[in-house]
């Protein structure tokens, strides 16, 4: 009897694992637990223990490395000695929350207004506005911050001339160049295209009969907008606010570039993410940095959970009837040309002018003074004066820069290959085992890194690299590759899952009947049918990795410098011309890759909105 029972169990196991979808599900369940769950647990544990001898000395008493302690949580959240908790945690958190709220307002108003004009009015020049408007979102987030500084800085605050002062002689106060308002404006302008895409997609797909019925009932345009249009786009508005808030509150790069100030300005703005990096880098307060990483993760997860709950509750706004093909466009009349010119100028200014400013700033020895035009920050073979780096020469001649660029390209290729392939396999398993607990768990675990802010996710693996048995990871290229693959896998897994769900199971069943092995079914049948979607799953992680700074800034060592961390180093040491030059180079590379994405996949980031 026992032999019969064990034989039956063995047969069931062989049958289970002979199905590719089952094997892939179990394989990635193990991989994701090891690469996501365990590092998160390590971070959590790190917030309750002494992390190194330096931290043991700082905490005091008789504690040793590895001992359990509540000191990190208590001192950071509660301690009133020298207002430590307020200065180190509550004030930066409050400033970051205010910055995030202000950026939400800018993104929603600016993006929403443009989306309405594109989808609901007879505005001319829609194609140009729609295409150019998304550029700030394609570019790295810090690009808008650097442009803001280049445009508004002035001699009145002890800096060189910015574009505004050079053109008009106007000197704005320092609070308009560095601090809370500039950070919020830069983030808002960066995420405005995100709001534009979400809100514009809803407006474009909205049933025009609803507005037409209100028009027949003699409702005014304002009343239609308030009673019909706004309630329908409310889910998109809420999603935009929550997602922009989540991204902004944990932003590192924008506050890093715009938190400079003179000694006597009183402009002491510092974000919670910048504070987290400072605490971790000191060596004495790593545990407190881990506490902030956990808080930011909880913020992000809570906000996205709230977003899912709200959008689920608003299903009553979904129209189930056929959509009218007749869209009633608002006639702008005499204001049509004026509005078009204003929008073209504004969108071109924030999308194209940053590239011009980076090129200008990289070629002026004294900002704003064209008599000091120089190409030495691009071509010089002599080290820059005051540089603490032996190889800080013209970036096109710098071995350090080319090595960093090559390392970034190599890392991005590897990350895209693995993240894209993993995403396709996860998508296949989830689609074929849809509804099963294991497939649902794999899908959720694969998406979890998206919910974790980049800086916090980097802190997760930093904590792991300090753990006994994993110290070989510290600063290694493999660590950067591992972190990038896991962090950008959600893009590929969601793309792969969507593509696989679109394929009927009958297609693969026909190949099975013909005796086609699984790997041939994937490469010869399924992949060719959904090639465009799968290519997006490879190319999107490539683009994201190429322009990422926050994720790698805690992890990259001197021998694994990436082009983005090199830019951060140049900016920190005051070599603004070199940092502008590298920023321009990164943006050009990213835009070329984006162009290739469009050509290979036929997809456009603004296609859901229109602008024909």
Image: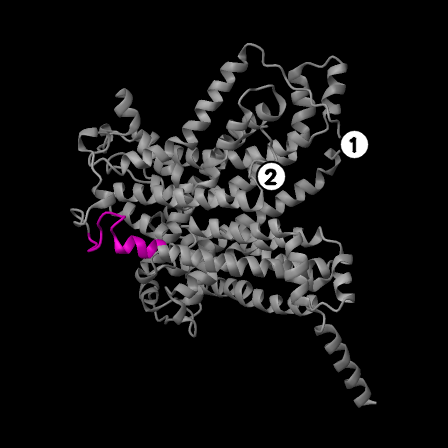
Quarter of the image with the C terminus in it: top right
Q: Residue at x 68, y 67 (%)?
A: 518
Q: Identify the mark at residue 270; answer none if there is no mark.
A: none
Question: Would residue 394 be counted in the magenta stretch?
Answer: yes
Q: Which residues are magenta?
A: 388-405
Question: Would residue 347 be counted in the magenta stretch?
Answer: no
Q: Residue at x 59, y 58 (%)?
A: 423
Q: Earlier in the sequence, mark 2 or mark 1?
A: 2
The residue positioned farthest toward the top in the image shown: 334
Image side of residue 111 versus residue 500, left or right: left
Q: Which residue is mark 1?
A: 322
Q: What percent of the width, then of the height, locates residue 393?
A: 21, 49
Q: What percent of the width, then of the height, locates residue 166?
A: 26, 25
- Asked whether the residues under the numbered discs 2 and 1 touch, taking CB atoms below 8 Å apart as contact, a structural biologist would say no
What distance separates the C-alpha of mark 2 from that of mark 1? 25 Å
Residue 260, quarter of the rendered image: top left
């Amino acid at each position: 009897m026992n032999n019969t029972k064990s034989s039956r169990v063995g047969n069931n196991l062989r049958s289970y694992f002979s199905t590719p979808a089952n094997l892939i599900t179990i394989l990635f369940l193990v991989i994701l637990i090891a690469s996501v769950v365990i590092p998160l647990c390590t971070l959590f544990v790190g917030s309750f223990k002494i992390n190194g001898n330096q931290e043991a000395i700082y905490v005091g008493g008789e504690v040793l490395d590895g001992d359990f302690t509540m000191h990190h949580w208590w001192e950071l959240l509660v301690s009133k000695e020298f207002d430590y908790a307020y200065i180190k945690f509550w004030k930066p958190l409050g400033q970051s929350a205010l910055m995030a709220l202000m950026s939400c307002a800018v993104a929603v108003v600016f993006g929403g207004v443009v989306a309405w004009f594109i989808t609901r009015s007879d505005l001319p020049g829609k194609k140009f506005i729609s295409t150019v408007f998304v550029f700030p979102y394609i570019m790295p987030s810090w690009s808008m911050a650097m442009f803001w500084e280049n445009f508004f800085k002035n001699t009145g605050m002890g800096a060189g001339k910015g574009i505004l002062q050079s053109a008009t002689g106007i000197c704005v106060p320092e609070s308009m160049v560095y601090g809370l308002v500039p950070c919020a404006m830069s983030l808002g302008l960066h995420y405005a295209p995100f709001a534009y895409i979400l809100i514009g997609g809803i407006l474009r797909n909205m049933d025009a009969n609803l507005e037409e019925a209100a028009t027949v009932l003699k409702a005014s345009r304002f009343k239609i907008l308030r009673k019909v249009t706004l309630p329908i786009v409310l889910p998109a508005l809420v999603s935009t606010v929550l997602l922009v808030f989540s991204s902004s509150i944990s932003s590192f790069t924008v506050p890093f570039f715009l938190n400079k100030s003179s000694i006597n300005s009183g402009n002491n703005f510092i974000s919670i993410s910048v504070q987290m990096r400072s605490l971790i880098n000191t060596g004495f307060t790593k545990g407190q940095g881990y506490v902030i990483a956990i808080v930011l993760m909880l913020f992000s997860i809570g906000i996205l959970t709230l977003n899912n709950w709200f959008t689920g509750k608003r299903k009553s706004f979904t129209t189930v009837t056929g959509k009218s093909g007749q869209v009633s466009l608002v006639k702008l009349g005499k204001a049509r040309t004026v509005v078009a010119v204003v929008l073209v100028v504004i969108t071109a200014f924030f999308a194209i002018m940053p590239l011009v400013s980076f090129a200008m700033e990289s070629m002026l020895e004294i900002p704003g003074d064209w008599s000091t035009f120089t190409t030495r920050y691009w071509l010089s073979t002599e080290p820059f004066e005051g540089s603490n780096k032996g190889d800080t020469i013209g970036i096109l001649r710098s071995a350090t820069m080319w090595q960093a660029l090559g390392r970034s390209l190599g890392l991005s290729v590897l990350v895209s290959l693995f993240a894209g392939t993993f995403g396709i396999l996860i998508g296949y398993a989830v689609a074929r085992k849809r509804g099963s607990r294991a497939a649902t768990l794999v899908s959720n675990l694969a998406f979890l890194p998206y919910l974790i802010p980049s800086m916090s996710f980097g802190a997760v693996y930093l904590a792991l690299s300090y753990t006994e048995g994993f110290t070989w990871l510290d600063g290694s290229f493999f660590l950067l590759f591992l972190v990038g693959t896991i962090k950008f896998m959600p893009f590929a897994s969601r793309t792969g899952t969507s593509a696989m769900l679109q394929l009927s199971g009958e297609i693969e069943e026909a190949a099975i009947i013909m005796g086609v092995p699984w790997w041939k079914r994937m490469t010869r049948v399924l992949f060719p049918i959904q090639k465009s979607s799968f290519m997006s799953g490879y190319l999107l992680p490539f683009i994201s990795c190429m322009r990422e700074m926050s994720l790698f800034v805690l992890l990259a060592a001197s021998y694994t410098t990436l082009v983005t961390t090199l830019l951060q180093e140049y900016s920190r040491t005051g070599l603004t011309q070199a940092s502008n030059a590298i920023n321009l180079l990164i943006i050009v590379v990213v835009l070329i890759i984006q162009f290739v994405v469009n050509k290979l996949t036929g997809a456009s980031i603004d296609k859901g909105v229109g602008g024909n």
